[in-house]
Image (cartoon, rainbow, N blue to C red):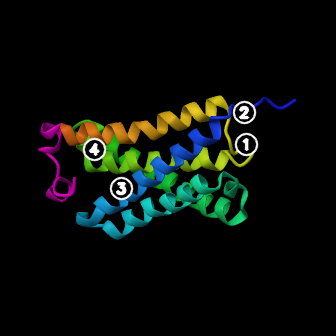
Amino acid sequence: MAPAVATWAPGLWRACNALMAAFFALAAVVQVNDPDAELWVVVYMIPAVLTLLVGFNPLVTGNFIWKSVSAIHMLFCALWAGGLAYHFLLHAKQNLLNEEEGRELSGLVIVTAWMALCHSSSKNPGGGRMHLAIAVVITLLPLLSWVYVHMNKEMRSSWPTHCKTVI
């Protein structure tokens, strides 16, 4: 017998997807001053659209096109994140959020983690308790980090100009 899904679970899953779609869209918008903005807008807009679709209809994760686009995007982001992590480990002078490569790495990890979570939800669109707990953590982490960084002017003081002028 399959475990019963709480009545609030599908709503929470949709809310997490709505927040993450908004986060990814906002992350794409703030790339306007970045020297390689075109690349980063695509990196963030693909999950924004895919996540928005999941928010509207969680069953979309079973669709072949959705699964294919998300899998290719996850692979691309994971490989890029691996390269950035290697570079970051070799050349980091400060903490993760103070280095541009560290912030880029964080973004790629968030994209990959969220897309993997959505991808795995195709078998259980409402999500189990663990799935929802992970979704809530992944949803809150980037949003709270963004608030923290926005409030911490000292942290932003060492950032390049293109990173300071958008937030």
Which secondary structure lies at badge 2?
A: loop
Mark 2 and mark 1 residues within 8 Å of each other at the beta carbon:
yes
Q: Which contiguous range is marked in magenta? A: 152-167
Q: CA distance from mark 4 to mark 1?
A: 42 Å
The residue depicted at 72 percent of the width and 61 percent of the height is 63
Q: Mark 4 — residue?
A: 91
Q: Residue at 68% across / 31% down in the picture?
A: 6
Estimate how packed mark 4 is, as few (under 14), some (14 to 19) or many (20 or more) residues with alpha carbons within 10 Å. few
User: Of the residues tagged 3 and 2, which is closer to the observer?
Assistant: 2
Q: What's the mark number on residue 5?
A: 2
Dot 1 falls on a residue whose secondary structure is: loop
Q: Is residue 53 magenta?
A: no
**Within 10 Å of the Cα at label 1, are there few (<14), some (14-19), or many (20+) other Cα atoms?**
some
> Label 3 near label 4: C-beta < 8 Å?
no
Sooner in the amino-acid sequence: mark 4 or mark 3:
3
Asked if residue 156 is among those painted magenta in the image, a careful observer would answer yes
> Which residue type does callout 4 highlight?
His
User: Which of the two labelled residues, at mark 4 and mark 1, occupies the earlier sequence position?
Assistant: 4
> Which residue is disc 3 drawn over?
27
Q: Is residue 130 above or below residue 101?
A: above
Q: Nearer the viewer, mark 4 or mark 1?
A: 1
Place of residue 128 in the rendered image (x, y in percent of width and height, measured from the top left): 68, 33
Q: CA distance from mark 3 to mark 2?
A: 32 Å
Mark 3, residues whose alpha carbon is within 10 Å: few (<14), some, or many (≥20)? Answer: some
* Residue 82 visible in the current orientation: no
